[in-house]
Image (tube, rainbow, N blue to C red):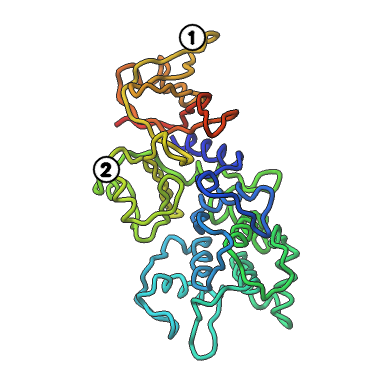
Amino acid sequence: MRSRFAAGMLALALSGASAVSLAAPLCVYANTATNFDYRKRVIALSGIMTTTGDLSQKITRAEFARMLVRASGYRSVLTDKSNVSVFADVKSGNEYASAIRIAAEQGWMTGYLGGNFKPDQYVTLNEAAKGVLYLLGYTADDFSGDQFNKRMAEYADLDLNENISYSDPTTVMTKSDCVNLFYNLMKTKQKGTSSYYGAAVLDADVDDDGEVNALAMADNTTRGPKLAETKSDIDRIIPFDLDDASIFLDGAETSKEGLYASASEYLVLYYSSSTKTIWAYNADESSDSDKLVAHGEVEAIYYNSTDTLVPSSVTLDDGNTYQLNSSEVQFIFSVYGDVKVGDDVVLIYQRNSAGTTDDDDSSSTYVVVDYVEP
């Protein structure tokens, strides 16, 4: 199950498309890489930050503190509430209080004179560089004599600045900058070791080309698919508190309440306990979501004329035909698999519309990437 979902996520990432890019007008952001869509997919999968919405948005110190904790070994204990108020301007009930407390206690970020943190102030490149360097194992002792300039030199020497072209350390960081920064962190070796940070901390292998392997990452951390039809089903399936989770519904960020509201019929869930991230799908063919959901009875299973043991497509009683392109999905619908004509299934699929226009979707094909038996 997991490898089919992982393969689907990787294929989508490599295609350069996302639910956001399909639904929103094209925008150009500064300091983005040619593989920026892939980087976004990896960072979204990691649970470090959401990658939807306005990527030119400036990031506050409070938001960056939470990103640092989500990128660290402390992510499993992060909550949106704290019983302790460490700074005068961050009350214990603040949604960022727990992250700010952890980031401050670990020395990744520091406060200001007077006992304030200034959570709503925008984070600068210098502050962000310090945070990721400290995650890698560096400390103030490594930069003695000139903390500011030596930190920035090490940040550049480790290529943590890849696709972040700012030279002024006081430049304010944007959401797109943080996508690049945390992706670069994941493919950087920890101080004094041969271990890549992503592999050691976030279950994210780095391939021979020095890039994060999204397929292995998804397969290592993702569970599902699971079928939910009620709020109780969601609570039973998800093994962590939804208040602390990053939740995506049909490719867009949503809240716990939004997830519950969508569970009226055939909500397909994937989740990662290590990153406290949930990906939910219930969109039909009228949606622009990256993954769509179809429910129905299998009316026919078709086989390739050159190999009568390998099914090539299935038709449901909704009248649509769904292509079976991966060996794992093909096996499920083969004579050796579990699904037969007359069975009730829920298919998770992607729509391929190469060669069509906005007014003509006749050549669209539906490709199955996963399935659930109700």
Crowd rating for badge 1 (residues with CA inside 10 Å; few <14, some 14–19, many 20+): few
Q: Please tell me whether mark 1 or mark 2 is closer to you in this view.
A: 2
Q: Is residue 316 rendered to the left or right of residue 362?
A: left
Instruction: Tell me which residue sits at (49%, 32%) in the image.
Output: 351
Q: Is residue 129 rendered to the left or right of residue 259?
A: right
Q: Amino acid at mark 1?
A: Thr
Where 202 sits versus 288, above or below? below
**To which residue does mark 1 refer?**
308
Number of numbered labels in the structure image: 2
Label annotation for residue 264: 2
Instruction: Tell me which residue sits at (49%, 77%) in the image.
Output: 119
Crowd rating for badge 2 (residues with CA inside 10 Å; few <14, some 14–19, many 20+): few
Foreground residue among 124 and 142 = 124
Mark 1: which secondary structure? strand
Give the quadrant of the C terminus. top left
Determine the image quadrant of residue 224.
top left
Q: Give percent across and percent down for residue 288.
A: 47, 40
Q: Are marks 1 and 2 in contact (CB under 8 Å)?
A: no
Q: Amino acid at mark 2?
A: Ser
Instruction: Tell me which residue sits at (60%, 46%) in the image.
Output: 38
